[in-house]
Image (cartoon, coloured by chain):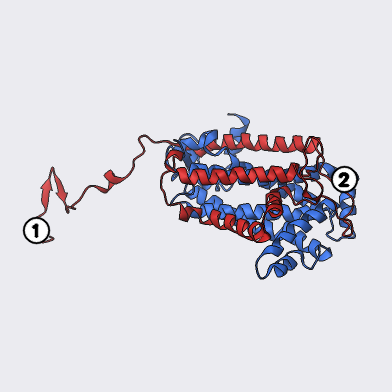
Chain colours: A red, B blue
Amino acid sequence: MSNQEPQIVGERRVLGIVPGRPPVGERKDPQQDDSVMVWPHLLVRHAVVSVAVLLLVLILAVLFDAPLRDIANPTVTPNPEKAPWYFIALQELLAQFHPMVAGVLVPGAIIIGLVALPYIDRNEATSPGRRKVAVATFTIFIVVWIALTIIGFAFRGPSWSWVWPWQEWYGVL
Amino acid sequence: MSIGQRIRRSTVGRSISRSPDVVTDRDRATKHWASFLLHIYPVKVRRQELNFRYSWFLGVTSMVLFGSLFVSGMYLMFFYVPSPATAYGDIQNLQTSVAFGQFIRNVHRWSAHLMVLAVAAHMSRMFYRGAYKPPREFNWVIGVVLLVLTMLMSFTGYLLPWDQLAYWAITVGASMAAFVPWMGAQVQATLIAGDQVGSATLIRFYVLHVAVLPGAMVILLMFHLWRWRKDAMLSQPQEGRA
């Protein structure tokens, strides 16, 4: 190739010809430049969100005091004894199923499932309509988990018996 | 010339911010790139990221709550000794005799509850948007670890007031660890440092709560945000829309 006379096309020297379609044509080009400067557009939104969140915390902190019961006493077991609310779904499961299922299989499957999710779900589509299985599975999990949390938090009384929260209240944050 | 401009263009002002005056977007990008405070942000993002529905701003909400917990937690540490003999009295003292003690404790507790909610909601929003798809899989994995860390932070902090609520919630929570096959008893004993919740548990949870877990969290957050910044332009247009 280097021995050939340089080819001149329109006053430009052609160095080589590559077969196939141009690589740029394969790329998904954004139809227009849809980028914006972070400063100020995103920063001002984040500032507003930050103030709103801190305001919410301030209002809650002024209105509701953090609970403080009697000093810890290993000999007096309260009834019901409840786990913190974010573990209460597991506690509810423990009341329903064999500990091996509720204490090991379910939490283990949740953690492993969440970590492995991007490697299991290799479907590249991002619109909900084209990833129905993933969306349905996750939605069912979330709904069941929230339901178990609410049941354990508000609908369980002494000895984990069923209570109506508007009659007796045993939930503590 | 306004006062602000005068300060900025003085010798001292120029030494603090060594970037050119902002006239064009290019100047602004230069200044952003050189700024320490803005270094966790990309210079540009996709326009869709400005919409509330894109992220519901749950990531930044979690960050703000983490900051609130960091600051209020520092204050609480001045007045708290992690020993069964003193812990409960310290909290009572905090609520009655320390300036803003009750208020700061309330802020810490509410921020903690809200942070667990916000991080879990952030994860759900990212799922529905499909933001874990290639090539951003690993940031999702880091996020899951951050969620677990958030819950562990909340769990370890729950014990510290050393009241009946704290004591029995931790007892119940830790008893779940006993169901781990083959080595459940050992896992539980390691977690609560003995066969029942006591002074060894308190110091263990305290060190985890104020040093180990926040340290791990900050390091992982740096990775998480670094990847977010690097990948800012990778989010697909129309991501997650029908």
**Residue A51 showing in the rendered view:** yes
**Badge 1 amino acid:** Gln
Mark 1 residue crowding within 10 angstroms, few (<14) / some (14–19) / many (20+): few
* Residue in front for this viewpoint, A58 or B45: A58
Mark 2 residue crowding within 10 angstroms, few (<14) / some (14–19) / many (20+): many
Q: Which mark is residue B95?
A: 2
* Residue in front for this viewpoint, A129 or B115: A129
Identified at 82% across, 48% down, the residue is A158
User: What's the chain of the residue with tag 1?
Assistant: A
Q: Position of residue A135 (x, y in %)?
A: 50, 43
Looking at the rendering, in which quadrant would you find the N terminus of chain A?
bottom left
Left or right of residue A112, residue A25 in this image: left
In the depicted structure, whether residue B157 falls above or below residue A41: below
Left or right of residue B14, residue B79 in this image: right
* Residue in front for this viewpoint, B151 or A167: A167
Q: CA distance from mark 2 to mark 1?
A: 90 Å
- Look at the numbered disc 1 and give the secondary structure of its residue: loop
Q: Determine which residue is flagged by label 1.
A: A4
Q: Position of residue B19 (x, y in %)?
A: 52, 43
**Residue B32 showing in the rendered view:** no
* Residue in front for this viewpoint, B142 or B66: B142
